[in-house]
Amino acid sequence: MGTDDVTIRAAVEATVAAGTVRYEMELESEPAHVNRSRSRGVCDFARRREASRTVTDVPADVPDAFQITDGSVVYTQEPGGGWHALDMGCWSAASLLASLGWFYGAVDATALIAAEDGAEYTVTMSARRAVETGPEALRDELRRAFELSGHLDAAATGWVRTDAANRITGCRLEIPPGGPGLFGAVDVGARISLAFSRFGEPAVIRPPDAGPAPSLEETIERFLGDGDEPW
């Protein structure tokens, strides 16, 4: 185990403790032809709310998406202005923590640059270790998030940049294909890049009134059960 793994977990905690953060995210699947998208948003860790806009480059026919997350519920704005609600079951699966939570599971970290104004590290992470060593209040949620994606027994690699306050200002994740999860085994990996800024600035995120939110399991069952799209 590297000497800096504790520092990485502390950096995640410092980032979350800031309360709010603006972020930019790029996601590319492996193989690359499956998905490539770019998102910008704001996450309010304290109130468990998030708002983001995503532009999908691959596939080319996917419309831009504006989403608001309130706890475990994700609201997606429809083309006509209405909203579709979906309950992911936990905040860690519905929010930025689905990516950032991996770093709670740092098992090896090596400093590339260490200075008074920040540092950079290469990191190896384990999903199970994130569940074991993450904040106690988040452990069940982290487990569910990794189980949904089929990554509970997976390891990921990445890179982290921190500022003088040991908050994460940038990171990259290389996530392998998922094992058995809610959608079965998924033969697609992902490369995720994140940049964080404006820590602690006020964020006003108002969830829409979209009525009851069906669970992810209910939605999938409906989709597979009757052959019609649930939306």
Image (cartoon, grey):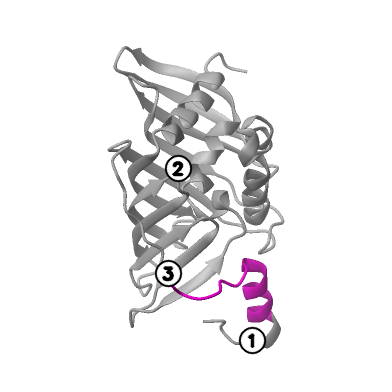
**Which amino acid is tagged 3?**
Thr
User: CA–CA distance between discs 3 and 1?
Assistant: 22 Å
Decide: few, some or many residues near mark 3? Use Cα within 10 Å; few <14, some 14-19, many ≥20: many
**Which amino acid is tagged 1?**
Gly
Q: Nearer the N terminus, badge 3 or badge 2?
A: 2
Give the magenta-colored segment's residue range: 209-224
Residue 46 is labelled as 2
Mark 2: secondary structure: loop
**Which amino acid is tagged 2?**
Ala
Of 199 and 117, the residue lying toward us: 199
Q: Residue at x 46, y 26 (%)?
A: 11
- Residue 75 appears left or right of 115: right
Of 205 and 24, the residue lying toward us: 205
Residue position for label 1: 227
Instruction: Give how far across and how far down residue 71 sits, in percent.
Output: 52, 55
Above or below — where is 58 with respect to 8? Answer: below
